[in-house]
Amino acid sequence: MENRNKEIARIFYRIADALEIKGETGFKVIAYQKAARVLEDLTQDVAELVASGKLADIPGIGKGMAEKIEEYLKTGKIKRYEEVMKDVPEGLLQLLEIPGLGGKTIHLMHKELKVQNLEDLKRVIENGSLEKLHGMGKKKVENIKKGIELFEHAQERMPIYEAMTIAEEVIEYLKGAPSISHISTAGSLRRMKETVGDIDILATGKDGQKIIQYFVKHPKTIQVLAEGETKGSILLETELGERQVDLRIVEEDSYGAALQYFTGSKAHNIKLRGLAKDKGLKISEYGVFRGEKKIAGKTEEEVYGVFGLPVFPPEMREDRGEIELALQGKLPQIIEPRDIKGDLHVHSNWSDGVLTLEELAEHGQKLGYSYLAVCDHSQAAKYAHGLSPERLEEQIKEIDKINKKLKNFRLLKGIEVDILADGSIDLPDALLKKLDIVVASIHSGFKKNVTERIISALKHPLVDIIGHLTGRLISGREGYEVNIDKVIEAAAEYGKILELNAYYDRLDLDEFNLKKAKEKGVLISIGTDTHYAHGFAMMRFGLGIARRAWLSKEDVINTLPLDKLLKLLSSL
């Protein structure tokens, strides 16, 4: 279970923001911000520190903050948070969700321009008054406009992880419905797009109306939007707000046709309809018909089989040439979950992770992996308790000790080394030579010669992989100013690997840049970048994007058995 550190840190940041919105400055704001940063960097769960009575002794926490943390652990609330938030208009609180917009700026806009909400903010941008505000200027306003675009896009679509978590919870609940026989996700969720607009579920059963009645009584339902004989729609209360889920019940002999149709994509389905027309057939959500006679529809195999086609992996159904290749018998075999032999980017409690090295090994073995690469942060990442050369030396010895006790599994000795402002990396070569794997990433200076710095790292003889290349966060950061094409060309030239970071809010590289990398012959590593036990599950989302990019197992290095992987890494 994830510890509470980051949870409480978010609350402290919120209090600091709210205080700034109200015009507070100085000690109070700084105290909450500092406590939040300390909590983020802690490698030990605050609950353990409270139990041992040592929490108040930590620099940056102190007695007052420790009492608030204890209050949260006991009650799930912080009274001070509720007091501060009560006086802040709801519309201004929403503005805190916009990337790049902080409490001070919101306070100034509210005080000088009477901004109360997002509509007001758009108005003062449009009429030019925001740009004239003290300390603003054209560039800052442009950044705020970009932040609004990102915020609004995030409101429209859900991250794949959130949508899948909700869908699978609902599907598990529906398995208890009367007479239900088949059930599946559909739409862009089934196609594993990085963000999802709707959560669509498709099912069959003898009594559709009873299934719908059962569906709308889901324990998290806050509003029933539709309840019919074959269709239902509910609004669920989730951790991240209200989310709509739609359920459709279809006849047993139309399930395959409906699943194919509602999975899409629209372009893929249009192409399939064209094939049907050429054969004098009709295809719909009810089946494939020759005249009035249904000739297929019960399964997707039947539906595609009519056209001499295989059942396409849902991730490939985007009309990007998959149908034409399949008709020629040249459809590529894309990577499967069973192909993954290990995770090549995980963090331990030696830096900013929660799990011990032993716990990482246990989780890796439970997942059936052959290896995990421990890639803690290097010393430049002070915020993440990055490893100094001395601590990395200690960790190497500790990993060697653990590996001696393990059978058919290995912790790889690695590091996520920072690419510094001058393109160098922040650990000595003599130490890097002792490692199995070196991931180099940018964590600061996002606008400072990023392309040149990454290419410099690619040239380094001891760097194997570039981590999260664009630095984007899907929910709120566009990423670095980087020429991806140049970096891919350099990776191909120097024979280095690019990472597909599987963390759901990164999924970096995206499917389009992964395709470019594949075309240039650049190999890919998939790493979850996990800091917690539950983060290992992110591998499925990385795999989903890899499959959307049509990567094969030959394109991904963590499909290799341990001996071949080590041989490849030592040759880079």
Image (cartoon, grey):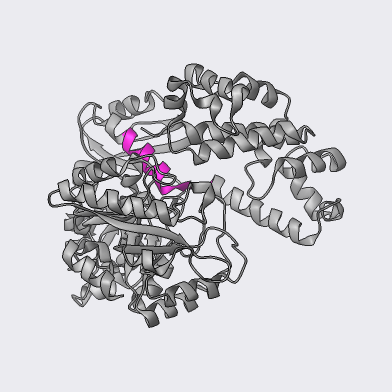
Q: Foreground residue, 232 or 48?
A: 48
Image point 58% across, 31% down: which residue? 11
Q: Foreground residue, 324 or 390?
A: 390
Is 160 one of the magenta-colored residues? yes
Q: Is residue 204 left or right of residue 499?
A: left
Q: Give coordinates of residue 226: x percent, y percent.
A: 44, 32
Dominant SS of magenta comes to: helix
Where's the N terminus, which quadrant?
A: top left
Image point 31% across, 51% down: which residue? 540
Q: Give coordinates of residue 542: x percent, y percent.
A: 35, 56
Q: Which residues are magenta?
A: 156-170
Is residue 91 something one can see in this rendering?
A: no
Q: Does 217 sit above or below residue 353?
A: above
Q: Give coordinates of residue 184: x percent, y percent.
A: 27, 43
Is residue 421 something one can see in this rendering?
A: yes
Quarter assignment of residue 78: top right
